[in-house]
Amino acid sequence: MKVLKFGGTSVANAQNIKLVLEIIEESRSGERLVVIVSAFSKVTDLLQLASQKAAQGDDRFKEIVAEIETKHLEALKALIPVSEQSALLSHIKRIINHLETLLDGCFLLGELSARTLDTILSFGELLSAYIISEALQQKIKNSGYKDSRELIKTDSNFGKASVNFEVTNALIQEYFQTNSQEVIVMPGFIAASTEGITTTLGRGGSDYTAAILAAALRAHQLEIWTDVNGMFTANPKIVKQAKPIANLSYQEAMELSHFGAKVLYPPTIQPVLRESIPILIKNTFEPTAIGTYISNDIFTQNNPVKGITHIDSITLVTLEGSGMIGVSGSSKRLFEVLSQKNINVIFITQASSEHSICIGILNSDADTAENAINKAFEVEISQNKIQPCIVEKNLCIIALVGENMKNHQGLSGRMFSTLGKNNVNIRAIAQGASERNISAVINERDVKKALNTLHENFFEENTKQLNLFVMGVGNVGEKFIEQIHQQKKFLKEKLKINLRVIALSNSRKMYFDEDGISLKEWQFLLDTGDAADASLFFKTAKELNLRNSIFVDITANESVSQTYEHYLKQNIAVVTCNKIACASEFDNYKKLKKLSRQYNAPFLFETNVGAGLPIIDTVKNLVASGDKVNKIQAVLSGSLNFIFNNFNESSSFHDVVKEAGVQGFTEPDPKIDLSGIDVARKILILIRESGYKMEIDEISNESFLPSACLETSDNEAFFTSLITHADHFNTIFQEAIAKDSRLKYVAQFENGKANVGLRFIPKDHPFYNLEGKDNIVLFFTDRYSDQPLLIKGAGAGAAVTASGIFADVIRIGNI
Ligand code: ADP
Ligand code: ASP
Ligand code: MG
């Protein structure tokens, strides 16, 4: 004997039912089968909605009934030959009429009792089992139908009745002894009280019906046919990387289902466990997949964690006060009150001081629980010995489950630090005495992030997913995306980093894809996006609440730099090549650094100085290791270096500046480079990173530009002014020749003072031979006092800047 149960999606329509019939036919190998079916997908929900509407005096319940009728008539017509349809169609119509009469009753009385609701809900399974058994008759003559209410007897706890196993087992055994049909189809979920009134076994209860039958008949296997390939390492609808678990112990399966793995209704395991009947969870839509096998067998596996689950809509109720201490029985009283009100306690923690006790219940029970508890402890509350209970709604429980967890240390630490790193606030923690699970209560809005990071950490060989929100896709941005696209595979395989671009924006458009934008066609996709809106961009990043989110600023825009603090406060890292934030007021720079620490969100800006050269990282390491920076000398402008290296008798200053722009070495507004502001900002950032406090206007900057050039209002006027003042630049050049030196724009910091300006560099100076667009920095520190630490290399250009941004992103991936 074998029991097969088919869930709602498996029997959603005629097409799916045909698959079910094939599976039943293939399962016949001389042994008898019991087939338990759920209502068609969503029908139980529709019945519930119709009942509520009817009881509220809303006659739209009739539309729902019509919808239910059509669903079933259509399925029947598609499954049964026309010649045999008429009697069956009238039977269905009779059932629907009966349903409508009951709902009319609720409508007229304006009332819906738990008992009536159970009767109404039973119609879903009654209809589906009838249709399926008739369709099966067409294929297997020796098959029949049995109403579960005649065999499964319960108490009268409507909505979730308890089974009387003694009576039920006897009835089932007796029936199957006298009946010899090869396959019997039965409705799941429904039963009857000893008085013969229809009851139900709780939502999702068809699994339980099947287990009751399997245990009573000592079947050799219980098969749960559903819409996924078994019990997964996490809910596959929320965690895309989740995988089916091949083997589970009964206890593990029980724990996973109790903590929210909806694929198996929690009470299902008890009856089959008693008889050691294995459960096999299979996918109706992929019958060849191996599924999940649940049994007593011990399967050794490296990973002590088998799955991660969650339960939504949880409320935490905390009762605390000095009156709880040492007074034995406060918790007993608390649980008694809850049990009297039929409230299921899902989670319990008690501080070891006994000063407070905290329980997790469903949101729907919160108000009843609050009133009942406050009433029960009325006296203590009036005497101020206990506070009125604290109720926090809309939380969620997440749990790690595994038989072998008890033999491994450090799992809870790993769980909590993973959540902590992602700024998931943990409200309460509990570990089952069996040590088969560790559970934590978190905010509902963090669920998706929490499940995915934990899954990544415990199941995905530590692959880390980084989710990028990129603003600015000009020269540098374009190169950056190109580099990600090129390196994606390598990063995944070699560094175990999965880089995804979730959002892109330029000044006109923005585009989002929660599953990662296809980088092959990002330009096209971005063009199809919505109008750019920086605050909506931030809001979307916040609401998506993805783990390891990184905001990448590749603009040179001041207003964008002012949004960093919002990102950091949401635990979203910021990577930027935009210097404005770090060169703004010292207090703002400090605030951003502080937020970064406080919210555990990296704030990296390596490309603010020297493009891709590791200058800032080096200063950070020097300072962190206890060294002290005393003096800095640097050529920090790749663009100015390019300009003065190419400016000579045969080229005009104007043309060289133009060329630097074409090659992407200057800022969009070249005056920012030529006025020295850009260099001043860079040395300021290095000074601050070295641990000194300084403001931009403390840096002396004698510009080599005539004031007429500095005062121009746009790029065009600026370039024209360079032509007008050609003589000025030629004179500077001649002076350099006369002094046998080269022109370099130098930044210097010494004795707490800093300046930037154009200098004549003699032949023997390390800056003399600085080529092209290179940068050079000399750090004189306590440790590097005679010979400075020197960093030199290409300090401007789209590709090197993009690779610097890339390196910052990877740094975050490696944290
Ligand atoms: P049925 O109608 O077949 O009884 P259910 O909807 O009750 O199916 O259960 C199957 C669903 O359970 C899956 O579609 C999936 O969305 C959900 N689910 C939640 N957690 C898990 C998990 N850990 N493994 C598999 N499925 C899960
Ligand atoms: N049809 C019922 C429900 O939706 C029982 C089940 O499908 O298991 O809850
Ligand atoms: Mg189910």
Image (cartoon, grey):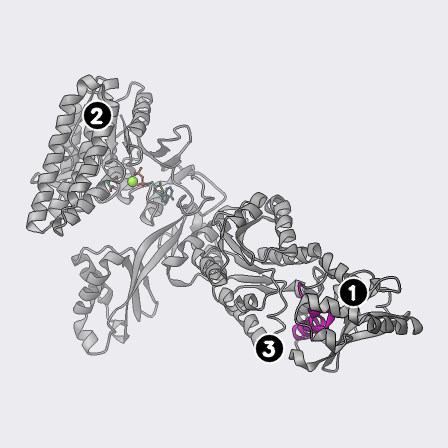
Residue 625: x, y in percent? Answer: 68, 70
Rendered image: mark on residue 654: 1
Distance from the alpha carbon under mark 3 to that under mark 2: 77 Å
The residue mark sitting in front, 3 or 2, is 3
The answer to whether residue 387 shows anywhere in this view is yes
Q: Which of marks 3 and 2 is nearer the N terminus?
A: 2
CB of mark 1 within 8 Å of CB of mark 2? no
Answer whether residue 619 is magenta in the image: no
Residue position for label 2: 133
Could you tell me the amino acid type at mark 3? Answer: Glu
Distance from the alpha carbon under mark 1 to that under mark 2: 88 Å
Residue position for label 3: 585
Q: Is mark 1 within 8 Å of ligand 1?
A: no
Nearer the observer, 193 or 174: 193
Could you tell me the amino acid type at mark 2? Answer: Ser
Q: Is residue 797 above or below residue 763?
A: above
Residue 805: x, y in percent? Answer: 64, 58
Distance from the alpha carbon under mark 3 to that under mark 1: 33 Å
Q: Which of marks 1 and 2 is nearer the N terminus?
A: 2
The residue mark sitting in front, 1 or 2, is 1
Instruction: Using residue 753 as the reference point, say whether residue 516 is left or right of it.
Output: left
Magenta part of the protein: which range?
668-690
Instruction: Using residue 726 as the reference point, say whether residue 123 is left or right of it.
Output: left
> Which secondary structure is most common in the magenta stretch?
helix
